[in-house]
Image (cartoon, grey):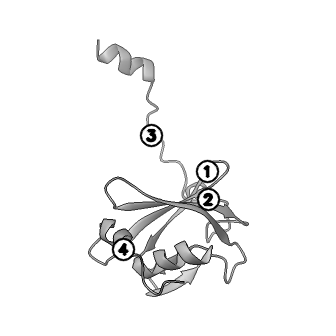
Amino acid sequence: MPEVLDPTISARLKRDDAGLVAAVIQQHDTGEVLMVGWMDDEALRRTLTQGRVTFWSRSREEYWRKGDTSGHAQYVKAVSIDCDGDALLVQVDQVGAACHTGARTCFVAGGDLGAVVGDRNQHDEEIR
């Protein structure tokens, strides 16, 4: 197992000022977006090589592997980088809740913000 992240992958990442990149976690078979976490090179290396998702905790300033204390593990199915290199998509098989509140997803726990729903047909009329 490599001890550092592949330099060609590392070079593609655009990190924030803290050296982190956002990782969107998605259930592999349903497409459900479960949560967003943060990774540095080491967290990504562990995720790519160990089959479980590892994050960098901004509040605790330490690595943590989802499920080690809760039992709600995330088993890696695929990891992709977006075209700009500033976000990762990690497809997983989620065991139990993804959110620390006990909800299946952090977005259910966070709640709907009541956005106006767009209509594709309206768009077609606007460009005519």
Say which mark, if any, is on residue 105. Answer: 2
Which residue sits at x=35%, y=70%?
Answer: 8
Image x and y of residue 86, in percent: 34, 61
Residue corresponding to mark 1: 32
What is the quadrant of the C terminus in the image?
top left
Comparing marks 4 and 2, which lies closer to the viewer?
A: 4
Image x and y of residue 43, in percent: 47, 79
Which residue sits at x=29%, y=17%?
Answer: 127
Q: Amino acid at mark 3?
A: Ala
User: For the residues marked 4 and 3, what is the alpha-carbon distance in whole angstroms?
Assistant: 29 Å
Mark before the other along the chain sequence, 1 or 4: 4
Labels 1 and 2 touching (C-beta < 8 A): yes
Q: Residues within 10 Å of mark 1 (few under 14, many from 20)?
A: some
Labels 3 and 2 touching (C-beta < 8 A): no
Which residue sits at x=68%, y=72%?
Answer: 73
Labels 3 and 1 touching (C-beta < 8 A): no
